[in-house]
Amino acid sequence: MTALSPSPEWQDIASPSVYEQAADQMRAHAEAVIKGGAGEAIFTTEHRPVYTAGTSALKSELLADNGFEIVHTGRGGQWTYHGPGQLILWPVLDLNKRKRDIRAYIHALEGWMADMLSSFGVEAVRRDGLPGLWVARKDIYLPDRMDKIVAVGVRVSRWVTMHGLAVNIDPDLSHFDGIIPCGVRDGGVTSLADLGYILSRAEVESAARDAFDRWFGPESDMGITRWG
């Protein structure tokens, strides 16, 4: 019988974190996983206000820096904002021991977050070709608009994952005005608080922990298939 890996260790990075310092900690752990010297982990934090650019970010979609730090990252995707009131989840997972399929991995990340949000009564959906999770606005003046509530941007090196998810709990949504978030012009950005759900970071993180195994546990499609 194949031995299973322990569940990923949840590691909190003190908040509010400086983006690059937090990312250095994540990258160092990923390198240790690649070398076989560390187990999987999920890093959590809230960043100081920062605009981050993925590998597909266009300079024209940075509209104003608003005095925030700007960081060019190695993750996929375009521009996004990080700041207080937003839960960052960075899974460092070894897809060599799971499933070597980046699309399946992103699909599982989205499913994980959809289940987490569903536990609070929030219906979030995928949009074809647009990573992340979206909610349909019920406002009378915005009958057809979809607003993003979870951003997804990943990097995979030697089949070990980095970066990941940003969940909007109660950030200052005006801070997204300095960018075209993720290059999407036919939708906006929302948060749990904006939708009327007043929740603490601890409550959201607890729900994320509870929903993790359905998508990444040993019995899931992205579960561990071998060890060693």
Image (cartoon, helix red, strand yellow):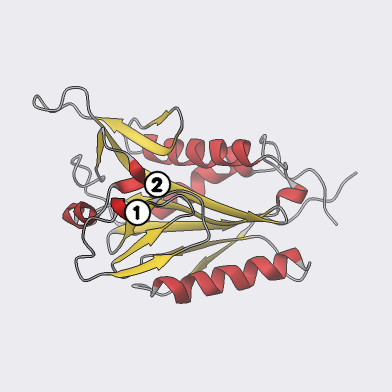
Q: Amino acid at mark 2?
A: Ala
Residue at 68 percent across and 69 percent down: it is 31
Regarding residue 13, the answer to whether it shows in the image is: no
Neighbours of disc 2 within 10 Å: few (<14), some (14-19), many (20+) = many
- Residue 146 is situated, as x and y percent measured from the top left of the image, at 27, 31
SS for tag 1?
strand
> Which residue is the extreme one toward the front?
60
In contact (CB < 8 Å): disc 2 and disc 1 = yes
> What residue is shown with label 2?
151
- Residue 174 is situated, as x and y percent measured from the top left of the image, at 16, 54
Quadrant holding the C terminus: bottom right
- Residue 165 is situated, as x and y percent measured from the top left of the image, at 45, 51
Residue at 24 percent across and 56 percent down: it is 171
Using the image, determine if residue 9 lies above or below residue 4: below
Residue at 45 percent across and 73 percent down: it is 20
Using the image, determine if residue 212 lies above or below residue 147: below
Quadrant holding the N terminus: top right
- Residue 6 is situated, as x and y percent measured from the top left of the image, at 71, 57
> Which residue is the extreme one toward the left?
141
Neighbours of disc 1 within 10 Å: few (<14), some (14-19), many (20+) = many
Depth check, front residue: 71 or 137: 71
